[in-house]
Image (cartoon, rainbow, N blue to C red):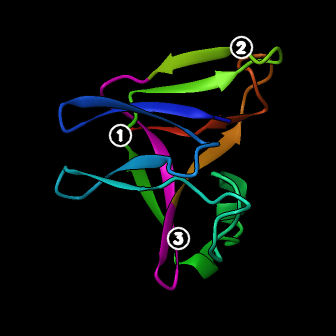
Amino acid sequence: MCGGIKFNYQERELSFYFPNPKSLLPVLKKDGSIGLLPWGRREKQPGKLPLGGWARLESIKKSTWDKYQAKPAKLAIKHFMEKDKEGISHWFNLAEDEYIQGLVARYGDELRVYIVTVEAEANQHLHKRWPRIIKN
């Protein structure tokens, strides 16, 4: 389900892992610049937005996220990490023209971004859910 990410920001490579409550995701803005937003919400974090760091594409299509003024976003991630059944991390690279789809959600002044997931093809990936990868 994409538990870690790496991306370039201001000439540095940054990495974040979802369990860290200070984790950020790189949202591509319309002008081509990158904005950093909090990656989801954890149980002990204040707020009204949903817990977790992922949004199922099926739930978006069913309008579940509409109450959060949800907007699609491109996440400028270069590498993402999945753990296998033994807990071993595996990193996956994205091509220059690929992005992970994100969902920016708002509740009042609270603003967070979630990684959109889809069902993985059987036996192709480590988990049943996989980040939705989109092309530019």
Q: Residues within 10 Å of mark 3 (few under 14, many from 20)?
A: many
Q: Secondary structure at mark 2?
A: loop
Q: Residue at x 51, y 86 (%)?
A: 108
| Mark 2 crowdedness (10 Å alpha carbons): few <14, some 14-19, many ≥20 | few
- Mark 1 crowdedness (10 Å alpha carbons): few <14, some 14-19, many ≥20: many
Q: Is 78 on the left-hand or right-hand side of 83?
A: left
The N terminus - image quarter: top right
Q: Which residue is mark 1?
A: 76
Magenta-highlighted residues: 94-112
Q: Compute the Cα span from label 1 to label 2.
A: 24 Å
- How far apart in space, not on screen, are marks 2 and 3 (Cα)? 33 Å
Could you tell me the amino acid type at mark 3? Ala
Most prominent secondary structure in the magenta stretch? strand
Q: Position of residue 101 (x, y in %)?
A: 49, 46
Which residue is labeled 2 in the image? 88
Residue sitting farthest toward the bottom: 108
Q: Position of residue 24 (x, y in %)?
A: 45, 49
Which one is earlier in the sequence, the residue at label 1 or at label 2? 1
Q: Which residue is mark 3?
A: 70
How far is the residue under mark 1 from the one under mark 3? 18 Å
Q: Nearer the viewer, mark 1 or mark 2?
A: 2
Tell me the residue at 44%/47% (across/down): 25
Q: Earlier in the sequence, mark 2 or mark 3?
A: 3
Relative vertical location of residue 48 with respect to residue 108 in this rendering, above or below: above
Q: Earlier in the sequence, mark 1 or mark 3?
A: 3
- Taking the spot 46% from the left edge, 60% from the top edge, the residue there is 72
